[in-house]
Image (cartoon, grey):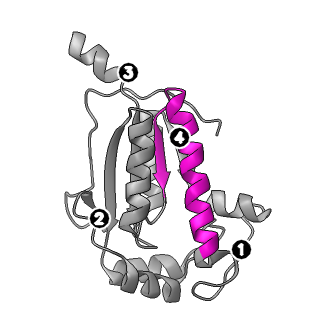
Amino acid sequence: MTLEHLRAGTVTLVLVGGLPGTGKTALAGKLAAQLGCTVLSSDRVRKRLAGVPAEQPCPAPWQAGIYTPAWTARTYQELLRRAGRLLARGESVIADATWESPERRAAAAAVAGAARADLVALRCTTSSDIAQPRLAARSGDISDAGPAVARQRAAEHAPWPAAVTIDTSGRGPSGRGTQWRGTRWRTAWAA
């Protein structure tokens, strides 16, 4: 009983990452609904920084527009700043982004460490046969990543061996019916 109460009070930063079209945002939303914690989306943060509504399309070629390396660095910095603020208040956070580089993942680990929060890393995967049609069918989504951007990102995505891999293809048990037992997360939707 005592251990269950201690787990209930654990503050956690969950990184939900992976390439475009692998189901990161869907998984983050499902986890948030199940666990009652805040989702911070890199797509939403990026557009807020750019001063455009989240639903407004802002497509751009690879590393152009609001998707230049400088904009991406600024987006992750702001995402982690917001996560750190929530974690410091005792609120668990799901951070939905590609988490493509070890440096960005290390920065997230530092934010979790500074808040004395647990860090959970989840990497969504699926085959390109599934991801590409998902990307092509996007409509009204806040993400602007299409098939061409996904191919470019795949070429630069660093391995993430510390993450738990979640297969979002729906073809097998991995990633389906995942249970997070023994942990209760506080509801905190304001961010």
- Cα distance between the residues tagged 3 and 1: 39 Å
Residue at 31%, 28% in the rendered image: 183
Q: Which circle's residue, 3 or 1, is located before the other in the chain?
A: 3
Q: Amino acid at mark 4?
A: Gly
Up-down relation of residue 26 to residue 50 (above or below): above
Q: Which mark is residue 9?
A: 3
In the rendered structure, which segment of residues is drawn in magenta?
Answer: 70-96
Q: Nearer the viewer, residue 170 or 141?
A: 141
The answer to whether residue 54 is seen in the rendering is no
Q: Which mark is residue 170?
A: 2
Residue 95 position within the rendered picture, expressed as x and y whole percent measured from the top left: 48, 51
Q: Amino acid at mark 1?
A: Pro
Q: Which circle's residue, 4 or 3, is located before the other in the chain?
A: 3
Q: Which circle's residue, 3 or 2, is located before the other in the chain?
A: 3
Quick one: SS at disc 4?
Answer: helix
Nearer to us of marks 3 and 2 is 3
Residue 37 position within the rendered picture, expressed as x and y whole percent measured from the top left: 49, 36
Up-down relation of residue 2 to residue 148 (above or below): above
Quick one: SS at disc 1?
Answer: loop
Q: Which circle's residue, 4 or 1, is located before the other in the chain?
A: 1
Nearer to us of marks 3 and 1 is 3
Residue under numbered circle 4? 84
Quick one: SS at disc 3?
Answer: loop
Residue under numbered circle 1? 57
Quick one: SS at disc 2?
Answer: loop
Q: Amino acid at mark 3?
A: Gly
